[in-house]
Image (cartoon, rainbow, N blue to C red):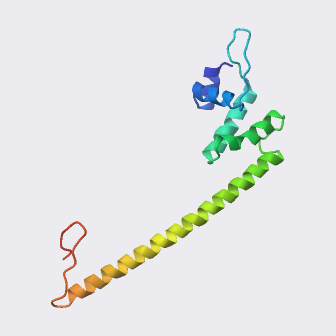
Amino acid sequence: MRIGELAERAGTTTRTLRYYESRGLLPARRGSNGYRTYDEDDLKLLRQIRTLQDFGFDLEETRPFVECLRAGHPEGDACPASLAVYRRKLGELDALIDELRSVRDQVGGQLARAERAMDELVSEAAVPGGPEPVCELGGRTG
């Protein structure tokens, strides 16, 4: 198949395919007419790349999976190098999850503090002569 058909079937653009070719992820075969030619194996490579990128892998991280497929394995993650990338990515994701949990805890603490402060203002306003709470938008709450 030609580049336009491959791009359409893979759900990408011809520009992306040329970029992958320049990075050595997609073979650069040409027919006798000079046009790029591709086959079903190339489509499988592209689907592997796209799936991994959808999972958050950067383009270079897809290389071991592509090389595994090119070596004739039925799946791109059937090689030790691919498994190593999976392990590394899981470690990165775990670190991000931990960081997000920490931020969430901090935001939750700030919310609890702000709610307590608001409750105190409302309580003080209920006391005759106490301050009247003011909304952030400039209006009175009561």
Provide residue 94's location: percent of width, then percent of height.
Answer: 65, 62
- Count numbered badges in the picture: 0
In which image quadrant can residue 54 be found?
top right
In which image quadrant can residue 46 be found?
top right
Residue at left offset 80%, top offset 39%: 68
Provide residue 62's location: percent of width, then percent of height.
Answer: 70, 41
Residue at left offset 57%, top offset 65%: 99
Q: Assign the C terminus to one quadrant of the image.
A: bottom left
In the rendered image, the vertical position of residue 7 relative to residue 123, given as above or below: above
Q: Nearer the viewer, residue 99 or 3?
A: 99
Provide residue 109's location: percent of width, then percent of height.
Answer: 45, 76
Spot the residue most to the bottom. 128
In the rendered image, the vertical position of residue 46 relative to residue 64, given as above or below: above
Residue at left offset 75%, top offset 37%: 66
Spot the residue most to the left. 129
Spot the residue most to the top. 33
In which image quadrant can residue 53 be found?
top right
Residue at left offset 65%, top offset 25%: 6
Q: Assign the N terminus to one quadrant of the image.
A: top right
Provide residue 50's location: percent of width, then percent of height.
Answer: 64, 39
In the rendered image, the vertical position of residue 109 relative to residue 89, given as above or below: below
Q: Is residue 141 left or right of residue 58?
A: left
